[in-house]
Image: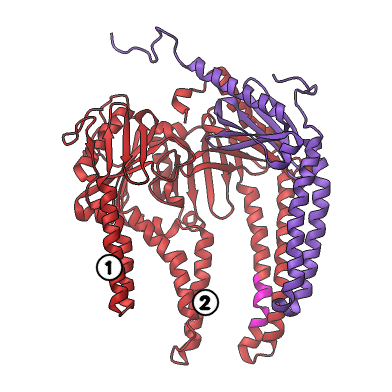
Amino acid sequence: MQGTEMIAPGERVRCHPSVIVENSLSVVVLVALLVTRFETTAVAGVLAAAVVALLLFNYRQWKLTTIRFGETEIVVERDTLFKMKKTLPYAKIAAVNVNRGIVNRLFGTSKLQININSGSSATVPEAVLTFREDTADELRSAILERLHDGEVVPDEDEPAESLVSFSPADVVVHGLFSVPTYQTTFGSVFLAYSIVELYTSAGAGFRGDGRALVSLLIFVALQVAPAVSLIFRYYNYRVYRRGETIYLQHGFFRTYKTSFDVSRVNAVRVKSTLAARLLHRSWIEAEVVGLASGTGESLRPVLCLLKDDATQQRLLRELVPEFVYDRNPERQPEGARSMLLIRAAAASLALALAMAYPSLRVYHEAADLAGTAGTVLPWVLPLATLLGVLAIFYATRVSCRITEFDAGKDLFTFVNGAVDRETVVMNYDKVQTVQVERGPVAGFFGVARARVYLLSSTGGASISSGYFSGSRLGVIGETVMERIASGEYDWQKNSV
Amino acid sequence: MFSPGAGTDGYRRLNRKCLLSMYFGHAISYAILLGAFVLVEIYAQGFLGPNYDLVRYAFIAVLAIVLAYMIVSPPVFYARYRYRITEDRIDVRCGILFIRHILVPIERVHQVEVSRGPINSMLGLADVTITTAGGVATLNYLEAEEAEKVAELLDSLVGRMLKERVPGPGVPATEPTGD
């Protein structure tokens, strides 16, 4: 490997000493909070000693951990009681990303995250190394150069125009309306409950039993916190492509610089929540192997924030033309409609049975109440159940209308989701396993569902189709096999 | 490929001993469930109060349904289970209520593992777990010898495929560039 200005090839280096503070910070803050709770100096002394011990431990970990950027691999070695030697061959590296948190900004450092091609550890980077900001950027460029067969990788700080400009308003809209509808619904219910509680306790000088506050906190946790987190995460969002590499840059407190080769994209998801669809907007996510830089859904890189459908389609064509093709979608057959109606009936029956006892109990207890409460409360649960049943049948009707399957030459697509919709375009060459499944009712109506397993950003994942004839879904597996047999499948591009 | 014992369609079936293995496994699970029921009978009356009878009857209903399923499912599983290994794919058809057709291209196989629990060891059976980058597929209740053969076959098929990809002596790994 070509060394950077600061690190010679083969030289053993350590991370920036700020990792000692970074690794100790959360415990130090916790201990500081505990110290304020305990007034006795003895407990405070013990806690202070624990902090000193932790700092010494982390200092030793830092001192005895070395990194060597060799000709063919990166070796991370720790010579402590629990020895560790991790070898990351350049040939196996899937992605190298730079990430800056608040502590990094204070110390002028960056985190270099290295991921290898692995399904089992897709959610955790194999190495997280903290260096001075310029060193981390240089190392990243040098490693990327290795990954691209010596091709010089353009500096990401060079001005590059984002394929689509995203204003702060776009980021806010994305944060607010990309939260799943079920989460928004539950959040709204808790908000409504807390407002009612506050309203009813207003007469008593807001002397409630804290239920309003708890509901409000749940609303914040379900609705406000995810939206704010998304807004900060995608602040100043930029996306562009140079050659075969896609670059993403965003972040307010923590900045993210992510890049990956287009060949690492296993599937593209165009998503829209109910609220987003009302605004005629959708966003694009990609399944990219080895990009661990967050948790859960946030592991999946977003290629386009919530934008109007026309812009989103234009970006899709310009950014990942490999996942665009002339689709000829087919709708679910008549048998699927019958199957879905039976399923809706079964779900409604289960809901009605589950709600029967609580409804009767509330009815009897609330019937004795005087005034409006006595008139309204007995019917709240039966009405809620009825609304639930109507929602189930409405979702079934929408599902019958929108669920699609499309088998193209190189790509295939599933469209699913009555409420939050998702169009997943997949490459046959990335499919690991295909499973076609039919239950007793589906079998009776001659339909089945396919489950396609592929390597996703969060490890192995399956993507399900709607109900189609088994032979039609069998085309997926057969095409995968045909492409391998005919040589259309290029293992060098697709091996993981 | 792997044709001895295969039907006219090339699919192989399981040995009938798999029924015994399933029944043993189910019996152990059922014993645990019965234990839980006995605990409910002894201790739950106090804290369930007037709901005790409701919970008790629900538990008995669950026990009856599970017992019926455990008795009926092994023969159905055995009758439906088919697998086929060819040069390019592993093909499994199985299921009790939900019938699955699983297709794993040999090209995608990363790892093959033969495993046997205590019941299967006693009966001379084994499972073969095939790992791909996107998940696992399992061939259950194969005869131990056959499981080893399947694993060897898969290893050799994967090994052959990888060998074919390594350029021979004197052949450059990539096309030369430039003049």
Main SS category, magenta section: helix
Chain in purple in the render: B
Residue pictured at 19% horizontal, 42% vertical: A134
Q: Is residue A328 visible?
A: no
Residue plotted at (80% across, 41% down): B20
Q: Which residue is mark 1?
A: A48
Q: Amino acid at mark 1?
A: Ala
Q: Is residue B39 magenta?
A: no
Q: Residue A193: which numbered mark, if any? A: 2
The colour style of the image is: by chain
Which amino acid type is marked by label 2? Tyr
Q: Is residue A379 magenta?
A: yes
Q: Which residues are magenta?
A: A377-384
Specify whether A60 is left or right of B141: left
Q: From mark 2 to mark 1, how far is it between C-alphas?
A: 44 Å
Farthest left residue in view: A5
Crowd around label 2: few <14 · some 14–19 · many ≥20 (10 Å): some
Chain identity of mark 2: A
Question: Tell me, what hue is chain A?
Answer: red
Q: Residue furthest front?
A: A81
Q: Is residue B136 left or right of residue B24?
A: left
The residue drawn where x is 76% and y is 49% is B26
Instruction: Return the x and y of residue A175 as percentages of the image width and height.
Output: 40, 58
